[in-house]
Image: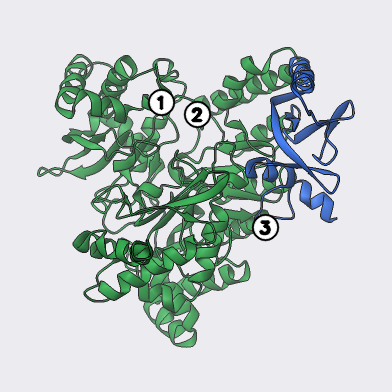
Chain colours: A blue, B green
Amino acid sequence: MKVLTANRLTDGIAVWYADGGWADTVDHADIAHDKAAEDRLEAIGAAAHASNEVVDVNLIDVSVVNGVVEPVRLREKIRAAGPTIRHDLGKQAARAA
Amino acid sequence: MYRYDEFDHDFVQARVAEFSDQVQRRLAGEITEDQFRPLRLMNGVYLQLHAYMLRIAVPYGTLNSKQLRMLGHIARKYDKGYGHFTTRQNIQFNWPALSDIPAILADLASVEMHAIQTSGNCIRNVTADHFAGAAADEAADPRPYAEILRQWSSVHPEFSFLPRKFKIAVTGAERDRAAIQTHDIGLHLKKNAAGELGFAVYIGGGQGRTPMVAKKIRDFLPEADLLSYCTAILRVYNLYGRRDNKYKARIKILVHETGVEEITRQVEAEWQELKDAELKLPEADIRAIDAYFAPPQLGDRPEGDEAVKLARLDSKSFSDWLDQNVVTHRHPDYAAVTISLKGIGEVPGDASDSQMEAVADIAEKYAFDELRVSHEQNLILPHVARADLKAVYDALVDIGLATANSNLISDIISCPGLDYCALATARSIPIAQEISQRFASLERQREIGELKLKISGCINACGHHHVGHIGILGVEKKGAELYQVTLGGSADENTSVGEIIGRGFSSEEITDAIEQIVETYLGLRLDPQEKFIDAYRRVGPAPFKEALYAGEAKAA
């Protein structure tokens, strides 16, 4: 299972492709279950990069836990949450608020 | 302190205007990311895990109060209320929006600061001893030469596209506090028998995936020849340094593959062509730059001895701080103060906006408006009258920056690691925090004595783990963080690269392992005066391996 992620051009904030747009959290990102779906996401990423919406576009491995998307690698978990040493920063801060 | 002349002002303003235009064109979609990336890197703008990161140059680590206050202002207005001081004596902000960067650079320019050449394959910020101009043991202040190198290397057309980045450090003392032997060029400013100033020149030091200690290629280079000789080194490197493999592109690899004797011959031959031409530094020019670094008027303050004596009696914590964070100054009535950015359990090198402003106020009031950033990620007040030390201490207590741990085990160098960095393979900061908390007792830390612990979250070694007395390298193995330990590194006048002690440790095990290493040292040192590094050099790795791994061998 993979989802599409990138950083927004204007402010560099990490975003994930969900429901036809770029979401601020990974929670409900569009999941590719097969190669064809991955190709579709990749094409969307390439187009968004070309139109200067986002930079550093990547497909990342995920799993689904309690109906919410969760990245597999620690690096991507940290991108999705924020620094593990400052819970007041990053996506986790908004979630806690 | 150096003040911009008209040329500097125009140059920095022109760069702000140029880069602002580039940012606007990028945001408008007129240039692509591939076109923009090298431009933003030339201006210190990286893309990290969570956001952009802006690295701001602090030339040779020297700041005044106004500049530090501006950094606090930037932290508050454009970032998330803090900044991170780095091992290159710079500062990084972790959350700026690209669209705000032109405004940030304009604010910086208003206090004679910029982010030029803090990234890219060029000559980076020249670093220097953080006690420069104050240290009792220096031959001369190394910063005028660092400034001369800065002027020469800024947008130097020949050296803007080197095979790889290039770092220069300068010290003016025998006791090397600038880690010059871990740099591409290390310069040791000293006097010859005739009392003339010149440099011992080292080249080819570096860390990263292939750590190398620099080799001395000249014992005494007259000061007038500084630029011609550095140009000769850079030319040889620019011509022969490898461009086919970025991991083999630093000058250390060229020195290693070519051999010290041959590369010295090449440098000297190139220098013969340059030494008597326009790069020779006129005496008047050197002295003109020198004048910018004239020390403040340090009036006699003989009441300091008595004041310190009384304050010591009054406060044990002040006394501890005095012993640990305050060092001798060339003027007997003064001292140099280390402001630890390594509070127990804190993030090494981080300071909040209000801390930066408060430290700026302290520097203005008690330290002749002068500050330094050390490569060990602390702040320094280089000139404080001993009579004012208690007042400075009290002011630091008020802002939580009076931790008395300079050079102790909790004075850890740590890179940002996987919590921020796109290149990292493991986290560094939480490991630093846990070790700091484990050794929280100052009494215990002082019992252990000088111990330099350095942590990197990937093989690029920004956390200097190779030259830590104890070094920790975080890697990713089978999806988990694993921490390798090296022992016996050092980054002073006896620079050495640490040796890997054995298999790595999980994040749950690493602090116990460090404690085991420390306990082993305490058990085998000859006396409390024998430092960790000296004991390690005497006994080698065997007792430490035994302590860490003997149980496993028996179990197997």
Pick out the residue farthest to the left: B193
Percent position of residue B78, x then y: 73, 42
Up the image or down, B359 lies above or below B303; here it is: above
Judged left or right of residue B384, residue A93 is right
Is residue B302 something one can see in this rendering?
no
Dot 2: within a 10 Å radius of its alpha carbon, few (fewer than 14), some, or many (20 or more) residues?
many
Chain letter, disc 2 residue: B
Say whether disc 2 or disc 3 marks the residue closer to the N-terminus: 2
Q: Which residue is denoted by mark 1 in the rendering?
A: B153
Viewer-proximal residue among A1 and B313: A1
Q: Amino acid type of disc 3?
A: Ser
Say whether disc 2 or disc 1 marks the residue closer to the N-terminus: 2
Q: Which residue is denoted by mark 2 in the rendering?
A: B117
Are the residues flagged by discs 2 and 1 in contact, CB closer than 8 Å? yes
Q: Which residue is denoted by mark 3 in the rendering?
A: B354
Percent position of residue B467, x then y: 34, 49
Q: Quadrant of residue B351?
A: bottom right
Up the image or down, B281 lies above or below B367; here it is: above
At a point 42% along the width and 68% down the height, the residue shown is B515
Judged left or right of residue A68, residue B176 is left
Q: Nearer the viewer, mark 2 or mark 3?
A: 2
Quadrant that contains the C terminus of chain B: bottom left
Q: Secondary structure at mark 3?
A: helix
Viewer-proximal residue among B89 and B263: B263
Q: Amino acid type of disc 1?
A: Ser
